[in-house]
Image (tube, coloured by chain):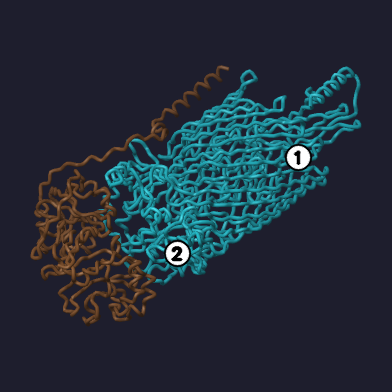
Chain colours: A cyan, B brown
Amino acid sequence: MMKRIAASATALILALALSAQTYTGGVKGTVVNRTDRSAVAGAEITLLSGASEVARITSDAEGNFSIPDLKDGIYQLIITMPDFLRTMVNVTVNDGYVKNMFKLSITPVAKVTEVDDASFSEFDMDDTGYSDTPTILFGQNDVFNNIAGYNFSSVRFRTRGYSSESQDVYLAGVKMNDAITGYTPYSLWSGLNEATRSKETVNGSEVSDFGFGGYNGLTNISPMASSVRTGWRASVLTNSSLYRLRLMLTYASGELDNGWSYAFSASARLGGNDWIDGVFYRSFGYYGSVEKRFGDVHKVGLTFMAAPGQRGAQNASTQEVYDLMGDNMYNSNWGYYAGKVRNARVRNTHEPIAILKYDFTPDNKKLTASVTALYRFGKNGYTALDWYDAPDPRPDYYRNLPSYFYMDNTDYNRQNYAKYMWAKEAWETDVPSVTHIDWDRLYTVNTLNTTSEGARSKYIVEERRTDQRDFNLAANGKWYAADFLTLAGGLSFKWNRTEYFKTVNDLLGGDYYVNIDQFAERDYAAYPTMIQNDLDYYLANGQAQILRQGDKYGYDYYANVRKAEAWASGKFTAGVFEANVAGRIGWSSLWREGLLRKGLFPGLDNDGNPMYWNGSVITTYDIDGKAITSYGESEKKSFLTGSGKVNLSVFLQGGHRIYANAGYYVDAPTFNQAFVSPRTRNTIVPDLKTVKTASADINYAFSNSGYNVRVTGFYTLIKDQSDLMSFYDDSQNSFTNFAMSGIDERHVGVELGFKIPTPVPNLSVQGVLSWGEYVYTSNPTMYQTFDNSAEIIASTYGVKIPYWKSHPGLDGKTKQHYVAGTPQLATSLGLSWNKNYWFIDADVDYFGNNYLDMNPLFRTDMAAAGPDGIVTPEEIDYMASQEKFDGAVIVNASIGKSWYVQRKYQIGFSLQMKNITNNLGVRTGGYEQTRLVDNTVSKERYYRFDSKYFYMCGANYMLNVYFKF
Amino acid sequence: MKSLRYAAAALAAAALFSVSCEEWEPVFTLDYGEADVYEPVTMTPNTTIMELKALYSKAPVKIQDNIIIGGQVVSEDRSGNIYKSLYIQDATGGIELKLGKSGLYNDYKLGQWVYVKCSGLTLGKYNDMLQLGFADPTGEYETSYLDVQYFIDNHIFRGEIGTPLQPKEVAAKDLLKEENLGCYVTLKGLRYGSNTSNKAGKEIFCLLYVDPNKDTKASSNRIFLSDSGLNYSVVDDPTWGITTWAMSKQGMISYLKAGSFDKAMVNDGSASVADIKDRLIANASAYAVSQYFLMDGKEVQVRTSGYSRFADTQIDPAILDGTATVDLTGILTVYQGATQFTLIDLDGVTVHKGE
């Protein structure tokens, strides 16, 4: 190294000495945006020879640059451009030729979208088994994502209607989607925005050279020290819809002369908000990274980061409750405790990620490769109330509502108007012990429940833990085989063991709790072994375990997942044409390992014999004659998967690009879809299949002199998805497990994004349109079993759900059912003004065709028919119809400005105002309760329980002040 | 430069203002301090329970006057045999409060003083048993449950937890006296049996449904297990082989599988239990059973809920074969003029063998 610098210095001195001499060598090329291949004008190009600067120029309007008059030798070319990552390449000039670098792509840095956190606000979807993890769009210099990502997050918009699991998120080349659920794991590093800002992204089925990806894009975040923006950056943020205060401080050294880079970041997000009581943050973030370059060829880096803390969750309620409270932001999760707002549902996480990354960039620059080892560990807890033989403490429990006492429809058998009025008055006057959790009562009950062992708690706060141990090894490489050919590929391996269990988080004034299954007790009170959560403990000690604070109880099992994958891609360029192909093969295996023997499903003893208690066999068997087992390892399910995709692009003069993508994907089901009731037993869902997806899109993009347009048409078919839930089935008077397989969907639509200059200087018109039809195209098969006995329910086991994809309407037409969770029509139109470090944006959004998530029970003949077993067209239409939300218009604006101080410091602010017209009626999601009103007068039919909804916050602001130096 | 300073100052002020908002602190630290402990209510009753009961003549009475009664809790729903009901007792007598909540023993402790502001409540009878509840506008029953929490909070007050009352010993001749109904009592020297005309001299009563989710009043859905069959025909075994206090869902399935009820008929005569056994097993549910005892020649029906924890507990064979007598402690009630007795739990059964 030193030798080389010395040599270069000598060369330089010689060059200076011989400055009169001219050379014929040189370097030229075109700077393009990595994301959309558009030319980047005004990029600063610095050429270094050793440590000294040889030339400094800027690219022209077409992105072209040329540096003539260079002596033969090795140079370093550095490209810098505001809002792009600093890019460095080595150039060898030899034999006096002008080296043509052709397209030098630089990676854009995302526009600062500080509202990311809004996407992580905790929604409590407990009753359903449905999850509600959003997909997040990065404004990665794609005009559609840029605008949609910012404007649509508040309605939980999902690109092309795809689920969160379909979006691939990588960290330093390692796929980070949750091994158990497939969900995107952004919350692992939320609050570390600066440290994780550097990322590269492709959309849809596009081929990338940093991973295979699926049909919903791929984002690779680089959390290594050298990728973090150099210098100090501090910011203070306050907002009114999530938390009061965010503090963030980040420093990155950049790469120092000695080859070291280091960076750190720390953040805190604190406090409640103006809109939803009980939702709060007490979250922190820490990040540290060091990297060391050894010569030009080797670089080793280590990163350690986590976002620990607590966040209070929000719950959905029925419209009746919202109307009674006069507030669509009502949250039933909290109550007053010593005068303070205490939330029963708090996420409590600390999941660090450790990354060791090695980069290999041999001298000739034809090859780059990296190997990453990544380990994720720590705790992930979520508290909830648990209670034993005591009334349901949730304030919006249906028996606490006026509608439980009186309904106009006499068939409901609810005709006590005086009671209705009493209940209504309590809600409307907001009596705290009625409208919120009555913590004082819970404490009183516990402390007064004295026994010989002390006070036995009847209500406790439990913490449900999902503690992951996730080890990953990934190797990725890229080879510039020829000017027209780039090859990339990689191998990865994932080892995941996630422990699921509960702990006693707070005894709420009592001294102990008891480790028995209160739901089993309802059916089997007279059978002491059957109500045991831990049968082995009971058999050894003659009684159930007495639980103290912090003790594990309830259930305890490992989810095991192993995955191995290989992928490769190739990029061919020929003139204006570019073709990409990519393929992937994968293998995955998953199994459950029970750590407790549950009384309901003791299985065989350690010698493989049936278990006995008091002379009777307590082992139970399934229909195939196999013992139903809670303890030990389940069968291992393995899946072989493979996918392929192809892209074709044509670059036309003037910044036009036409491109098309197509792909076919075979993906393994996730662990959380694989077990009928993982908390209690090893039973695998019948008919567990791989998910098959075919996806194609065609696009036109135009990017030139301030114009930025993309139009896309897409068509995607998804086959053989599964889903799983557990719920109380009123028609069976039992808690049941419900598996669905063979869920097919079709997603068709168009996307448009544009930003167009107006005749007014510095003013642009910008807008997006996402218009699709995301529908179910199959009637899945259901498998319903009793949770307490694992017995199948004959009428709903292995039977198609007849009204899932559609149902016959009363007018004789078929009523289609839609994929829920996102508006299928979303538009935004606005103005953007930029001058002299000022920016002002304003836009009007419209959201429509948003549907409520369906529960499968309401789509069965059983539910439609009611107790009399007779299905009428009216009953089908009532029970199976899907709710469509009203469309909504939202107005947003933002303003910002930054100042440079003495050319060294930068101070700035941005103020965003969302939902300025204070529209309080925008439903963003929710679910149907899987419960039926069965106690009707006529005994002819069932009625639905009311659905539960989430609403968007009213007018809110976010103010960010930042300082860079 | 000047504008910059102003802007910075304004921003700092804005940030400070938002931080000082009052909801900031309460949700921030996760340190919530101590819960407010329940303070017992002290009230002075102006009416005794017997005076209140005397207000009833023939029809339900909606109480308008400012009547306050007070009594100590004598019942507990911990074992599940008493459900949505709370019995309180003062020096004059006891009364059933139709408190329509589960797990009442969590809030109402044995011996705890409970005061009831009766204005707005309804006093009514259910098959001769007086109850204090809410009005039932449908007229199906004389009272309905007190199950609106806000109403309960405004009418029923929990006082000091006193020493639990000792049971009153009640003689056979006093079983139906109003001052004993709804009270915590001990009945002594009972022997298993009944005054049935059936020669067995033993009897149970139980009503099963073919499908409990369907119309439970339709004769096509009812199966009576009692001392007489269809058209008052004589049955062989009026105890139907039921040797438990009641039957849970699992208990019922066991009896069905054992064939105990095979000869019982659906009330419209359409089928026997043996004919529809698979259906009955599929629709199995918990059922209450009345076991008949004799006390000095007077019948006492010990009625036990199928949802009680001791539903499937075997009754001591010495009781069933008549060789033992029992003392029973629990709540005394009446049903259609007959004495009914509700155990609070099995501690209320004392067996005297060989007497």
Front-lying residue, B74 or A485: B74
**Rendered-image quadrant of the N terminus of chain A:** top right
Q: Is residue B234 left or right of residue A358?
A: left
Decide: is A958 above or below A490: above
- Classify A96 as above or below A871: above
Q: CA distance from mark 2 to mark 1?
A: 58 Å
**Mark 2, secondary structure of its residue:** loop
Please report the residue visible at 29 percent of the width from the left and 56 percent of the height from the top. A405
Residue A368, disc: 1
Q: Which x, y percent locates residue B202?
A: 20, 74
| Residue A446: quarter of image | top left
What amino acid type should be assigned to the residue bearing mark 1?
Answer: Thr
Going from N to C along the chain, the mark reached first, 2 or 1, is: 1
Amino acid, disc 2: Thr
The residue to which callout 2 is attached is A619
Where, quadrant-wise, is the C terminus of chain A in this rendering?
top right
Indicate left or right for A825 with A300 as reference: left
Residue B32 in the image, given as x and y percentages of width and height: 36, 35
B179 up-or-down from B238: above or below: above
